[in-house]
Amino acid sequence: MAIQTIQTTPIDGQRPGTSGLRKKVGVFQQAHYLENFVQSVFDTLGDLSGKTLVLGGDGRFHNRAAIRTILKMAAANGVARVLVGRGGILSTPAVSCVIRKYEAMGGIILSASHNPGGPDGDFGIKYNIGNGGPAPEAVTEAIYQRTTTITSYRISDAPDLDIDHGGRSYVEQMQVEVIDPVDDYAQLMEQLFDFDAIRKLFAGGFTMRFDAMHAVAGPYAKAIIEGRLGAPEGTVINCVPREDFGGGHPDPNPVNAAELIELMARDDAPDFGAASDGDADRNMIVGRKFDVTPSDSLAILAANAQVAPGYRGGIAGIARSMPTSRAADRVAAALGIPCYETPTGWKYFGTLLDAGLATLCGEESYGTGSNHVREKDGVWAVLFWLNLLAVKGQSVQQIVEEHWQRFGRNYYSRHDYEGIDAHAAKVLMDDLRVKLAAMQGVEMNHYTVDFADDFEYTDPVDGSKAAQQGIRIVMTDGSRIVYRLSGTGTEGATLRVYLERYEADPEQHHIPTQQALAALIAIADSVASIAYNTGRSNPTVIT
Ligand code: G16
């Protein structure tokens, strides 16, 4: 075995987005592409001697090849030890859990999350720091800067390692420990939730369907929900991770998880439905004939946190991304705790969680989590709901409707225009920015604009700043329209339009969502000239 230094030149476009570097598989397969990025990560981290790294991914196409390369590069860069999930498998929240448990310096996650996989699909890589969470902007920017000046990378010429069986081996001086992907995570879940109560729920005939969408949540959900909690076999479906996610789009929303939604709409539907995404950090919660929005899910878990043993002592605060509905704010106000509003991206929650300011966090994009790890966590959210259902003895619908009665309902929807021309998207956002100053007081469709701005954030813990995080038009009654460009897509641009309206009157809580938001939708279209700018008369996806 020998360590080789390979000459290379910078490759354009390696700036990480909302959550790491995501590109088409073909881009990652180009000579030196992955290596340049990984070497830039190692160069940014500095001295790696004596340090432990965690490594794993969601099992998508190119996962194994990337793991082989990264192990050889880690060894050549002086890393002391790598904990790698068996078969290269570790969900994003499991990486976070393992980093924290074994006090690793950080971890490398191979995933493009909810983006489709396979040879023509997407691949991604991101670095998580020692608190278990995504590297903050300052670190990802330093990595990017390094990719622009890189001239060589180091790699061992050792043969490929067997990662399909547990145990220890060596690459150069570096110890590699192949770990069970599920064990550490399952132990953590057992500490947080009342597994006895959930076991009794299933023993009493409660029925559930968890759609793992052929992605990495499968092994976790199967081992915990069927294995440890006694749900009947078949409760977890599509549970073997496949390199192409079975050809599907592993994004748990009512559009992409249509099979589950159809099942849950039947008279004989299970009591509870759930799904998660490619790397198991997102979740969708569904009742019988009843979808729960991610924003409501966050608010409901926060309002009922004391049902779970891990949160019995109360929660210190809630954090939500700016476009997420303000349902959680009402809960925070009732509990007398703060609610923090951050830019989109889980990385912005890290400092709040570390400082103990927030306990629960959530995003409209089907992400919910807490201070147990530093990533959003799909299986965690589903277990929290199971704990809640077990304690309350009510249906999903009853729990949500009772919540609305107490706090009011925040009607909420997101309209996505996917794969639009990147220049057209920029023009649309630039035009909106120009209009902002003149919008205050303007009346449209019975709404009056209270203020309009481009969201800026100053982290209350470390003072770091983020600008241009979404254009918001806020009405005098608190209704909102928010426009953002996605930071996770790999083709053209995706415009997201977020719509929210608050309704206190329980008599008005059962209007179909798109109808309840119709006036705001019309305003959103006309203010941004969406059809004109994008050439699209309808969104690609409505959630
Ligand atoms: C990532 C981030 C999330 C963010 C989501 C959507 O999720 O971790 O915090 O809400 O992207 O981002 P965008 O609207 O920019 O596409 P994931 O599940 O893809 O890692």
Image (spheres, rainbow, N blue to C red):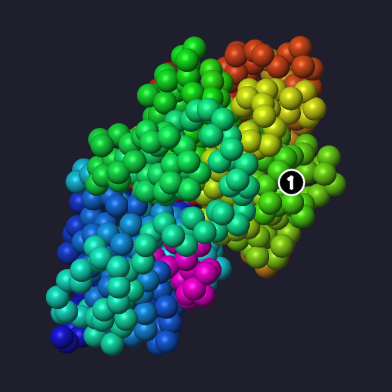
Residue drawn 39% across and 29% down?
A: 256
Is residue 279 rendered to the left or right of residue 136?
Answer: left
Residue drawn 70% across and 55% down?
A: 358
Residue drawn 56% across and 30% down?
A: 204
Residue 166 higher or lower than 275, as above or below: below
In depth, the one of 403 and 65 nearer the eye is: 403
Quadrant in the picture for residue 492: top left
Q: Position of residue 241 (x, y in %)?
A: 30, 46
Q: Which residue is mark 1?
A: 306
In depth, the one of 181 and 442 nearer the eye is: 181
Residue 211 higher or lower than 24, as above or below: above
Is residue 97 rendered to the left or right of residue 243?
Answer: right
Q: Position of residue 461 (x, y in %)?
A: 70, 65
Q: Where does the magenta region start and end?
A: 95-108
Q: Position of residue 110 (x, y in %)?
A: 34, 58
Q: Can residue 325 be spotted in the picture?
A: no
Is residue 190 rendered to the left or right of residue 532?
Answer: right
Q: Can residue 289 be spotted in the picture?
A: yes
Quadrant in the picture for residue 403: top right
Residue 279 higher or lower than 416, as above or below: below
Residue drawn 74% across and 46% down?
A: 306
The question of residue 106 being in magenta is answered with yes
